[in-house]
Amino acid sequence: ELDRKALQGEQLIEYGRDGDGRTVTVITPIVATSDFRGTNCLGCHVVPEGSVVGAVRVTYSLAKLDAWVEKNLLVSGSLNILMLVTGILVITLLWFHLPLRGSLLSLYFAVILFLVNCFGIGIFISTISSTQQQAMLTTFFVNMPMILFSGFICPVDNMPFIFKCIAKVDAMHYFINIIRDVCLKGAGIHHLMGDYIALGILGAVIFAASVASFRKRID
């Protein structure tokens, strides 16, 4: 079907997948002209000028390019996260004089797990949104419940039972618990293992679902 369209004079670009990853196929029609890069095609092809005499089909593998992009995104993202968290910690400690009785390792580990959840939610919203306005509105309706049910404004223990159940699937709820206990109580990873495990499970599920949705949309 693609070759037939190309022989009708249409240049085509199609993305697909193979065993190694994504591919892009380019099909370019060959048009007979009197001066095709210095060559007179009409000398060999007895056809009217402008006729399509064939097509060139080339398939490129994007696996190496995708791997390179993912690697650089991971490195640059990690550096940006490290600088952001470090900057926030410096401002918090020096400006607001917030005590940090726990270890930085516990804090950074919690931030990484929480950002995995945030990235997963962001990717999923981008795949289900058709326009930027839809993505902004969806983000607003997702972020507000996350903040309300996290315990940041109102303690989860004071909420009705149904809201407590919702808080159990709120990544921000576990993140705030970890930040509070690490900074104020000096708790370590082994003391907050339940919160870390819940944050990791939520992140893995959300991120896996978002990546699957993203790949499905690309295909």
Image: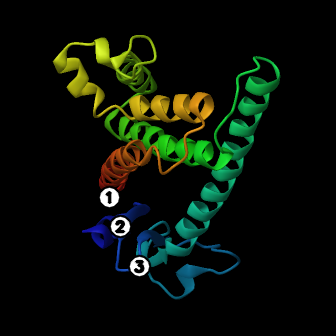
Q: Secondary structure at mark 3?
A: loop
Q: Is residue 148 above or below residue 63?
A: above
Quarter of image, res 131: top left
The colouring scheme, among rainbow, by chain, secondary structure or one colour, is: rainbow
Mark 1, Cα crowd under 10 Å, few <14 / some 14-19 / many 20+, is few
Tag 1 near tag 3, CB within 8 Å: no
Q: Nearer the viewer, residue 169 or 159?
A: 159
Residue 89 appears left or right of 66: right
Residue closest to the eye, 32 or 150: 150
- Which residue appears at 60% of the width and 42% of the height? 107
**Which residue is located at x 48 percent, y 29 percent?**
176
Between 80 and 149, the one nearer to me in the picture: 149
* Residue that badge 3 annotates: 20
Q: Please name the residue that numbered disc 1 is placed on.
A: 219
How far apart in space, not on screen, are marks 1 and 2 (Cα)?
Answer: 6 Å
Which comes before the other along the chain, label 1 or label 2? 2
- Name the residue that disc number 2 marks: 16
3D distance between C-alphas at marks 1 and 3:
14 Å
**Displayed quadrant of residue 122:** top left
Up/down of 157 relative to 19, above or below? above
Q: Circle 2: is it few (<14), some (14-19), or many (20+) Cα within 10 Å?
A: some
For the residue labelled by badge 1, is the local secondary structure a helix, a strand or a loop? loop
Q: Identify the residue shown where x is 47% and y is 84%.
A: 45
How far from the left and from the top, in percent, is residue 186?
60, 37
Horizontal and vertical percent position of residue 78? 65, 52
